[in-house]
Amino acid sequence: MFSLYKKILFITKSAKNIFLALPLLLLLLTLGCSSKDPQSTFDTLGPVSELQLELFYILFWVGLVVFILVAVAVFYIILKYRAKPDDSIPEQIHGNTKLEIIWTVIPILLIIGIAIPSVQAIFASSKPDSKYTNNNLTIDAVGKQWWFEFEYPEYGLITANEVHIPVGEAVTIKLHSQDVLHSFWVPKLAGKVDMVPNNDNHLWLQADEPGIYYGHCAEFCGQAHALMRFKLIAETREEFEAWISHQKTNAWTSSDPLAQEGMEIFMSRDAGCYACHTIQGTDKAKGNQGPNLTHFASRTHFAAGILENNQENLRKWLKEPDKVKPGNLMAKNAAVYNGTSDSLTEQEISALVAFLRSLQ
Amino acid sequence: MTSFPLQISRPIHPTGIWNWITTIDHKKIGILYGVSAFILFIIGGIEAMLMRAQLASSNLKIIDPELYNQLFTMHGTTMIFLAIMPMGAAFFNYLIPLQIGARDVAFPRLNAFSYWTFLAGAIILNASWFLGGAPNAGWFGYAPITGKAYNVGHGIDFWIISLQVLGIASLAAAFNFIVTIINMRAPGMTFSRLPVFTWMSFITAILLVLAFPVITVALIELQFDRFYGTNFFITSAGGNPILWQHLFWVFGHPEVYILILPAMGIVSEILPTFSKKPLFGYPVVILSGIIIGFMGWMVWSHHMFTVGLGPVANSVFALTTMAIAIPTGVKIFNWLGTLWKGSLTLNTPMLYAIGFILTFTIGGISGVMHSQAASDAQQQDTYFIVAHIHYVLFGGSLIAILGGIYYWFPKFTGRMYDEKMGKLGFYAFFIAMQITFFPMHFTGLNGMPRRIYTYGSEYGWDFWNLISTIGVLLLAISMVIFIYNIVSSWIGGEKASGDPWDARTLEWSISSPPPEYNFAVIPTIEYRDDWWEKKMLGKTSEEITSDDVHLPQPSYWPFIASLGLLIAGFGIILSIPVAILGASITMIGVYAWSFEPVNDPH
Ligand SMILES: [Cu+2]
Ligand SMILES: [Cu+2]
């Protein structure tokens, strides 16, 4: 049985181009959605998602055949046995044991056939086997309402909403939640695993190609669930290490006077930014309610992946965060935004923007 | 006993509104259930349309996120608990006594109590819109977001209390039907002759009795967390959010079969009638229903493949879930066997039943796809799942219910519906349904998570979302056709005979609508499809009418007892004295009900 299955899988694999091209044509061309869409589960770029897609195709083909059989039977019967005016009462057939056995046994065999790759895939996707390059890189991902924190415990490094991994290596991501349920999902690399408070999980993934991958929280987590996203950046081992060592340095070195002014506002009681954000190398900014901003300017996006990191967006964010991301906890809890203290002036915002953008 | 102070006599021949409030006639209660559930179905549908408007394109700002969360929570809760389940109850009520040859259910007053309590639950849930906001944590209410720390308003409280009240209604009804089916069958109506719809209802009622207490326990724990500071699910105090998920789905999966088995029963009645053939493989269809009901308890964690239960647990639940496809497939083949070599009349109910086979097959297949724990990790919590549940619930349960409404419409109302409009409505409905829900497979596989109120244009989800939204508009039109047909035919349709379809089961042996006592003489059953066989053998006798059948009289008390629950429900959430008042009214109602006199037969 097992070898038979292997054989079938082999045939499937050798015919992969046809096998994959056909459904892709069927599913994607007719559907008009390109597999290049950022969260397409067909554009698999890592071994885990690939394995999941292979399993999907097995089910897809079996399902398609079953559906076609049922549909053809239905339409054939409707056309053939439609009542005619001169119909006499049809023969009152109560059943047929042989048929019952046949159509019970065939699904059983089908299900057994599917069960084997099914269970194999569950175990294969649960941890990387020895054929993958594995430097035991482990990243802690923490889901918070409504953003992601990423910690590299080996390197003593914390960042937010953007996680870097070396390409071509199996990486383990440990999943935690600080408040409600969230789920960590990078569709092109691996299926999701939930982030559950008091109940740590993990997943593994590998990116086969360098690039910026889209991630999305996939478990309902409240008001801004739709806007809880992140980016995963896969780069070569050298680039990754350069990134690590850069992130470990202190970013605040600017001598621009506007940025200097922004720094002072950031650290002031009135604005209170320091109470929620950490900027490594300063002795005041050690808060942890909001994302770590140490190398904020080096990130491509912010506010959990929804805004591109540029001057204009940052202004918008600092002016009215609730407009950009309704419900977010900075707008709700920071005194300058929730009305318990004066809002920031345009001048103060300019200074803060200059400061934050200097945190390379 | 005569000194009991509340011993007021029962109403005799009440008229107008009192006729409905005090009725304990299973047929009237069935109609009350059906009409109420349909109105709630429309409310749930409007909620869905608002969501679809917001999702029509990327970055729309029609509905704000908080309202959106309330809408999807209310849509799910309404459709499952207030629309499809009570529509099932409407059919149980109306049809089971007729199909088994009884004059009423076993406990007619309890039956009235079930209906009024269901209505109380529906009112409590929907009142939340006006009392500070509807619940907003999804119909599944995953901990810990339902906790006070993340959810301060009363929305979740209304959700908890209404589900508890609905639980009382469902349990009372389920016990009632179990006893009715076991004890009230006419002589000769053995279990091997029981109509398939009644069989499926029987299994459903047993599932209800076993499943509802599980969610009741979970809801009590949650209620205690919210009201009295316990820590079952409060994660910051060490509570366990996974516990909620297990309890919820141990209820929730059998609930799926509670929703679909009655539909399968309806289809199993329609297909034989319009094929002029008996159901193919009757014992196999029944047995697979039982197996589905039984195995429904072994698959709940397939809703939790991404929770991190580990590969062993995931494998086990993947295998059991795949296995449940076997009895389901067997049912589909037997339906095809029923059509095979028949003489098919493709009128409206038959079209719905055939539509059911096609769409339910699609839903079943995507269900087997989700059973693959590994690839389900890509599908879980995406629109692919939304597509699946709508193919099984909308394209399964609801399509069969609509077909059932047409099929039994002459029996319910004594009038015929408009066949042309019925067919038009069906085609509009069927096509609109595919346009609405099929594209969700694509958006889901293209990475669109569910329960998001907005998305960016860069994801490539715009096109198919727009199609889905257009589909919903068409669906609404098809429902208008349906409603128009039903209402206008009810008022002015042609008069229906007792057996307009030349059908097979006992309910067709009496006039349409049936007299209050159903059967003047309790029939003796000799065959499966007794009515059909007797017609074939020419053994039917002229229907007799009777004036002196003794029936239980109407009663005020079930309504009063439910009214107390309604008041108590609001009271628990808003004010303890009101809760005490409500509870007292219920106690008085139940007490007076137990000592109620029986009026003399006049
Ligand atoms: Cu989320
Ligand atoms: Cu389930």
Image (cartoon, rainbow, N blue to C red):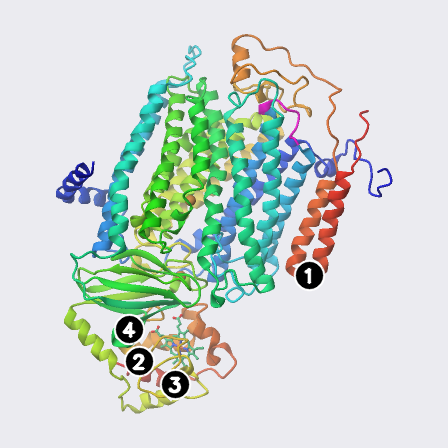
Please state the quadrant of the image where ligand 1 appears. Answer: bottom left
Q: Nearer the viewer, residue B564 or B48?
A: B564
- Whichever of callouts 2 and 3 sits on the residue coming sooner in the sequence is 3
Q: CA distance from mark 2 to mark 3?
A: 13 Å
Q: Which quadrant of the figure contains the N terminus of chain A?
A: top left
The secondary element bearing badge 2 is classed as loop
Q: Quadrant of residue A189?
A: bottom left
**The numbered mark 2 sits on a residue in which chain?**
A
Q: Is residue A25 visible?
A: yes
Q: Are marks 2 and 4 on the same chain?
A: yes
- Whichever of callouts 3 and 4 sits on the residue coming sooner in the sequence is 4
Q: Nearer the viewer, mark 1 or mark 4?
A: 4
Q: Residue furthest left?
A: A14
Residue underneath mark 2: A294
Name the residue type under label 3: Phe
Residue underneath mark 1: B575
Residue underneath mark 3: A266
Q: Residue at x 39, y 51 (%)?
A: B304
Name the residue type under label 1: Ser
Neighbourhood count class around disc 1 (C-alpha, 10 Å): few under 14, some 14–19, many 20 upward? few
Q: Are marks 3 and 1 on the same chain?
A: no
Q: CA distance from mark 3 to mark 4?
A: 27 Å
Q: Which mark is residue A153?
A: 4
Question: Magenta segment, which residues?
Answer: B99-106
